[in-house]
Image: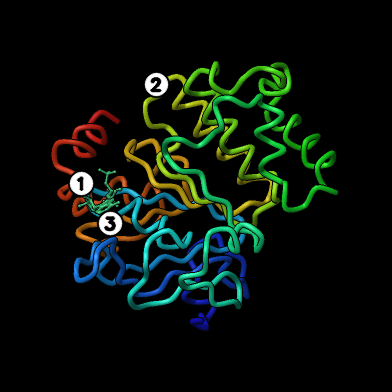
Amino acid sequence: MTTQTNAELPPGVPAGSRPVVEAKDLVAGYLPGVNILNGCSLTAYPGEMIGIIGPNGAGKSTLLKAMFGLVKIHSGTVHLGERDITNMRANQLVQMGVGFVPQTENVFPSLTIQENLRMGIFLRPKKLRERLDAMWDLFPNLHERKDRSAGALSGGERQSLAMARALMMEPSVLLLDEPSAGLSPVRQDETFIRTRQINKTGVCVVMVEQNARRCLQVCDRGYVLDQGRDAYTGGGRELANDPKVIELYLGTLAKEVGKE
Ligand SMILES: Nc1ncnc2c1ncn2[C@@H]1O[C@H](COP(=O)(O)OP(=O)(O)OP(=O)(O)O)[C@@H](O)[C@H]1O
């Protein structure tokens, strides 16, 4: 893993901090000989909330999946703290403290809310009660409906449940793939606020988002991916106002930033 001097740490990250998770120079893809990531790097420090944005097909979801062992990494490394987790399997990573919430099919629709949360911690059943209580505190709306089937939930509630399920194992890093996708603007806003609350409980969050402007507003730092590489990185607001980033997003971010 890279040893960073304090001078290289992002603004706001306390001196002496070590990365919680670090992906370095990832080359990865779904099919032999077809790379989607072409040398992509990302570092998240304790307490950070990181946004990954970029044009369609840039490889944002692929980056998260590669970090979670769902896409084969051909070269480059992923570290969780000091430990090399490159190409480890997802079930191992969950045990080690990596949570992942996919964009779709992220709950068991035929199970109740409470049963879904139980599934999230079947590897550590002794912690069930304590973690359930923590989740009811964080997501009181889920508690009210704990015996309701997950299939009957609205999009926003389902997204909350998916996050809660991933949090049952007390991950040190939570990877979220487009948590606001398909939600109304109000529900999107709630999702961003909720995600920030989760982050404030001490979980490092790395999220892919289509809603680039809102994502950059709430995140400490962002990465802009283009063609499988991290083209730009910086503070959230700094990136949102960066002409180069705006240029890459002509037609999307450019218009939105112009409204501010
Ligand atoms: N399961 C898969 N098998 C083969 N190719 C895939 C698979 N999933 C994604 N891809 C390809 O990988 C490329 C990057 O996809 P990815 O979903 O990572 O992009 P993205 O930046 O998240 O895009 P979007 O914002 O549209 O979701 C695309 O060309 C896509 O077609």
Circles 1 and 3: CB atoms closer than 8 Å = no
Residue at the spot of label 1: 246
Instruction: Pinpoint residue 165: horizontal percent, then vertical percent.
Output: 63, 39
Tag 1's secondary structure? Answer: helix
Residue type marked 2: Pro
Q: Which mark is first along the chain, 3 or 1? A: 3
Instruction: Determine the secondary structure under disc 3.
Output: strand
Quarter holding the C terminus is: top left
Q: Quadrant of residue 234?
A: bottom left
Q: Is residue 4 above or below residue 87?
A: below
Estimate how packed mark 2 is, as few (under 14), some (14 to 19) or many (20 or more) residues with alpha carbons within 10 Å. few
Q: What residue does disc 2 label?
A: 185
What residue is at 60 percent from the left and 78 percent from the top? Answer: 82
Badge 3 crowding class, 10 Å Cα cut-off, few under 14, some 14 to 19, many 20 or more, is many
The image position of residue 142, as x and y in percent, is 67, 23
Quadrant of the image occupied by residue 76: bottom left
Q: Are marks 1 and 2 in contact (CB under 8 Å)?
A: no
Residue at 70% x, 31% y: name it: 115
Under mark 1, the amino acid is: Ile
Q: CA distance from mark 1 to mark 2?
A: 22 Å
Count all numbered tags in the image, as a single digit.
Answer: 3
Q: Secondary structure at mark 2?
A: helix
Q: Which residue is mark 3?
A: 225
Q: Nearer the viewer, residue 96 or 151?
A: 151
Identify the mark nearer the N-term, 3 or 2: 2
Amino acid type, residue under disc 3 in the picture:
Leu
Residue toward you, 232 or 184: 184
243 sits left or right of 201 in the view: left
Sequence-first disc among 1 and 2:
2
